[in-house]
Image (cartoon, rainbow, N blue to C red):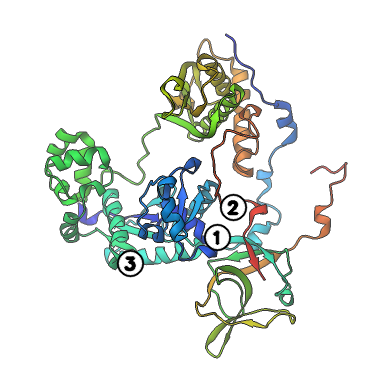
Amino acid sequence: MAASAPPIALVDGNNFFASCEKVFDPSLRGVPVIVLSNNDGCAVARSAEAKALGIPMGAPLFKIRDIVAAHGVRVFSGNFELYGDMSRRVTEVLSSFTPDLEVYSVDESFLAFPGMDHARLLDLGQVIRKRVERWTGIPVGVGFGPTKTLAKLANYLAKKVTMFDGVASLMEAEVRQAVLAQIPVGEVWGVGRALAPRLEAMGIRSAYDLAALDPRQARRAFTVVGERLVRELNGLSCLGLDDVPPARQSAVVSRSFGRAVTSRAELEEALAAFAHRAAEKIRAEGLAACYVQAYAHTNRFAEPESRYAGCAGTTLIEPTADGGLLIGEVKSLLERFWRPGPGFAKAGVMLAGLVPEASSMGSLFGRPAPKRDKAKRLMAAMDALNARMGRDTIKPLAAGLGKPWQGKSAHRSKAWTTRWAELPVVRA
Amino acid sequence: MHRPTIPFFDQAVAAGFPSPAADHEAVGLNLDRLLIRHPAATFMLRVAGDSMTGAGILDGDLAIVDRAIEARPGHVVVAVLDGEFVLKRLRLRGGRLFLDAENPRFRACVAPTESGFDVWGVVTAVVRQMGAASDPPKADEQR
């Protein structure tokens, strides 16, 4: 019953990270801005002006030095404290339009509007756009569709086609008939780089071709994921807004180091910090890990004789999300693969075999219950404090205070909205 | 089974952070609620300069700026002028908007430049801490 499907909107920030930078620095108006990935490597966000200069997404900074210099492109290191706070603000404004909201990523949310008259959607979209931009300074695009997949496609159109003025709707079948044929199949949500060439090899080039596929055939060729895509493109909702996202399989925290790490103490400290952060992540989702792995490797482009990748993992006696215990584990894991000599360029910690915390019953060989409860209370207290006072207000000493291994971020802007000492200045 | 030592200071945590005040939030006065009407749209900026002393806004004050409020003439606003944040009074004269200073030592008004100006947000309050705020706490003070 596509006709009566409640409209779903996908709202996303335009060039979100670059837009966040522009809100608090008026000298950036009309100026091309790029934001770099972790460790100042590649451009991961580009303002409209930077896109117009032809800077591609993901371009490594060293490859675009000339354009940057010639056009006065302003370059920023990622400032995730700022982006996180701006994301929270955008979500808060969006939730004033409907209680039915699902945050999909740092700059995208799905909103449902059951019972909303389709004829009024484009107006609603404009109201959303204006309010979010007025309140937070972040420009957004809005796409409506009867399914999440179509809402996402509509959002793509809202951005690509200037005439739509930032809002597009694919609620009506006739509109879909007209425009889906013009959208390359690779733009469909969930198709991705792996699937697109396979589809093209079958003669499926546009979103329209994919929608025209027989769902059963899609299932045979591309499993249930393919079948769901075809149904969603035809307006049959398969992904509800309240669908619980698939439970996380693993949590990884890894970093490229700003410089080669050669001291064991430093590597140990980095791994401890990663274990602490990974434990925090799974606790936030009420999960516990059955398996922990630590790894570190040298620069992949190093001389073959000085290349080294070390990795070790262990099954935990009982599922745990206890940061202190996991830090201890990664330390003994490091003991197993540590080797003096090579300069490590990257390291990480992975927690896997995640199970709901409640189902972690403990085992014969696990820690006695009182001790476990104490650690759990400590973790809960730490999480509560960090939630209230800011990340890393308190943390295990093993995670280090100085973090000399932390990546480069030479061009980071200030935490304009989250630290008293870094507020923007206004001239009176 | 050997378990590595967990490097936490249990007792310090227990003693340093007694029961959080969350239970008591319902009673008492909350400055956030008084000063911030639209939390998602409210930002804090630090004031630098003396051009608005006539409006009671001093150098070093904290300006609370609400972007959700539509600026009207008479409001004190943060505007973007020539690539900079400025804090002035918005005035309407002869059908044109101006940014006025409020200090006799300053040029009374800033006419919009060729590129004009944009209102970034409306100032709803300023916060000024007195010297005593930075006095060190007494030894017997329990915070």
| Distance between the alpha carbons at the discs numbered 3 and 2 | 32 Å
Under mark 1, the amino acid is: Phe
Residue A401 is tagged as none
Q: Judging from the image, what secondary structure is the residue with disc 2 in?
A: loop
Q: Earlier in the sequence, mark 3 or mark 2?
A: 3
CB contact under 8 Å: marks 2 and 1: yes
Question: Which class describes the residues within 10 Å of circle 1: few (<14), some (14-19), or many (20+)?
Answer: many
Query: In which chain is the residue bearing label 3?
Result: A
Tell me which residue sits at (26%, 40%) in the image: A193
Residue A7 seen in the figure:
no
Q: Nearer the viewer, residue A343 or A330?
A: A343
The residue that label 2 is drawn on is A414
Q: Judging from the image, what secondary structure is the residue with disc 1 in?
A: loop
Query: In which chain is the residue bearing label 2?
Result: A
The residue that label 3 is drawn on is A165
Q: Nearer the viewer, residue A209 or A146?
A: A209
Q: Is residue A71 left or right of residue B121?
A: left
The residue that label 1 is drawn on is A24
Give residue B78's quadrant in the image: bottom right
Under mark 2, the amino acid is: Lys
Q: Nearer the viewer, residue B132 or A202?
A: A202
